[in-house]
Image: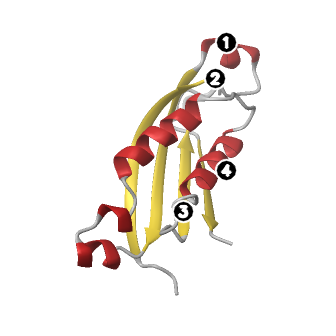
Amino acid sequence: MTATDQIALTGLRAMGYHGVLPHERVDGQLFVVDVVLHLSLAPAAAGDDLAATVDYGELADRVVRAVESDPVDLIETVAERVARLVLEYPPVEVVEVTVHKPDAPIAVPFADVAVTVRRSRG
């Protein structure tokens, strides 16, 4: 059964040193992350119990730490890292992670660059 309920964290901001160009690894840049968790919220609501859901404050801190750690070349890798982290929470069945790189080194005017991954348990 696929959960129809969601918890969404949007616009999480973190300083990271990800990218293939040398200056990206030295200077760093802002990354913005959106995370959508698909899970059943019925058990938490029925018992008014935080332990039956995901503490989104704790999750936000963990996501930011994951983005700020261990530089990699691709934002695809960052998105995968965050998705794996979210799936560590037992109630989460599916997660969608979007990593935005608003200051990507692109020579033409642009609004945003982003990748989105969708991962499920098992």
The answer to which of marks 3 and 4 sits earlier in the sequence is: 4
Nearer to the camera, 47 or 20:
47
Alpha carbons under labels 1 and 4: distance apart: 23 Å
Q: For label 4, count other residues whose C-alpha is less than 10 Å away and answer few (under 14), some (14-19) or many (20+).
A: some
In the image, residue 13 sits, relative to residue 23, either above or below, namely below
> Which residue is label 3 attached to?
95
Tell me the SS state at disc 4: helix
Q: For label 3, count other residues whose C-alpha is less than 10 Å away and answer few (under 14), some (14-19) or many (20+).
A: many
Alpha carbons under labels 2 and 4: distance apart: 16 Å
Residue occupying the far bottom of the picture: 1
Image disc number at residue 26: 1
> Which residue is label 4 attached to?
80
> Which residue is label 2 attached to?
17
Residue drawn at (49%, 41%) of the image = 62
Tell me the SS state at disc 3: strand
**Mark 3 belongs to which amino acid?**
Val
